[in-house]
Image (tube, rainbow, N blue to C red):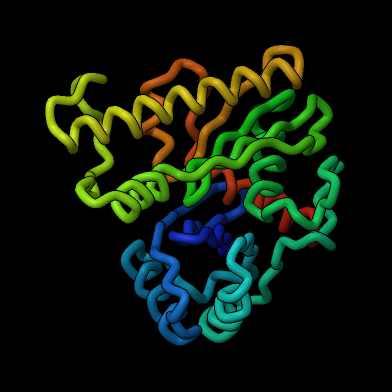
């Protein structure tokens, strides 16, 4: 079995594959003070909850945008699963051309999304990943990674409003009943959720024009469903796209 880990600034999305089948998946917080022993113990508990034997894990694949926790995660996987960990980085053979000015600047999760997205949906393709930041990635018909856009994530936007204003509270991320809010929370929800849907539609439209053709649009990330239902611009939601890309990249390294 393969353990795949997508390490973001806020959460870690992880899953276990047997062959190309995703057997189980979890989301845990990315606590940067967590020790390798604590993480390894938590992972084993998660496995036990799904009835999966940790001893069956033979390898691991990791995409991380938080360098300070990467080494600890690799160590936890080694200690508690006895598995070597493939870490997706700039030197990895990813099988696609990276057209960014400096390929080292492209986040590992964005590369995994491009690989997994093109394998599943072909190209041209736009991948929208709703994480701590929301990223928009453009993939050409031949699978080349062309670049994209980065916007503040939904939670960052809400936190900024609460932190930088005297009277606006932190609010729950739920859909408001109308665009005209009749209280502060509903007004903020309308501005954030409906306004963010407009941001997503606008960037998809602009990127599509530059890509040419009729690109498929795939959304992933924990908050994807909340925004996607407010717009018709997204073709499909695939919550495990990054894990699938990691699986394919791990297979490429082990051929």
Q: Residue at x 65, y 33 (%)?
A: 120
Side of 93 relative to 181 (left or right): right
Screen quadrant of the C terminus:
bottom right
Q: Is residue 126 left or right of residue 175?
A: right
Residue 166 visible, this angle? yes
Location of residue 45 by image quarter: bottom left
Quadrant of residue 105 within the rendered picture: bottom right
Q: Position of residue 182 (x, y in %)?
A: 13, 25
- Vertical side of 107 occupied by 189: above or below: above
Image: 253 above or below 176: below
- Determine the residue positioned at 34% across, 52% down: 164
Q: Position of residue 108 (x, y in %)?
A: 68, 55
The residue at 19%/32% (across/down) is 186
Residue furthest to the front in view is 166
Q: Residue at x 40, y 41 (%)?
A: 223
Residue 163 drawn above or below residue 40: above
Is 19 located above or below residue 54 in the figure?
above
């Amino acid at each position: 079995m393969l353990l795949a880990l997508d390490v973001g600034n806020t959460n870690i999305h992880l899953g276990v594959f047997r062959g190309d089948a995703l057997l189980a998946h979890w989301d845990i917080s990315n606590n940067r003070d967590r020790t390798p022993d604590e993480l390894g113990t938590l992972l084993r508990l998660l496995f036990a909850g799904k009835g999966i034997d940790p001893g069956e894990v033979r390898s691991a694949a990791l995409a991380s945008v938080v360098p300070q926790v990467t080494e600890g995660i690799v160590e936890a996987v080694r200690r508690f699963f006895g598995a070597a960990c493939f870490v997706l980085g700039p030197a990895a053979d990813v099988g696609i051309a990276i057209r960014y000015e400096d390929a080292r600047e492209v986040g590992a999760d964005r590369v995994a999304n491009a690989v997994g997205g093109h394998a599943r949906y072909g190209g041209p393709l736009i991948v929208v990943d709703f994480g701590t930041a929301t990223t928009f990635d453009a993939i050409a018909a031949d699978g080349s990674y062309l670049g994209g856009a980065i916007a503040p994530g939904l939670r960052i936007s809400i936190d900024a409003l609460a932190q930088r204003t005297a009277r606006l509270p932190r609010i729950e991320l739920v859909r408001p009943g109308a665009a005209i809010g009749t209280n502060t929370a509903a007004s903020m929800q309308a501005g954030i959720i409906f306004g963010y849907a407009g941001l997503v539609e606008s960037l998809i439209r602009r990127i599509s024009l530059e890509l040419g053709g009729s690109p498929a649009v795939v959304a992933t990330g924990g908050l994807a469903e909340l925004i996607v239902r407010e717009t018709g611009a997204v073709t499909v939601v695939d919550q495990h796209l990054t894990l699938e890309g990691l699986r394919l990249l791990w297979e490429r390294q082990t051929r």
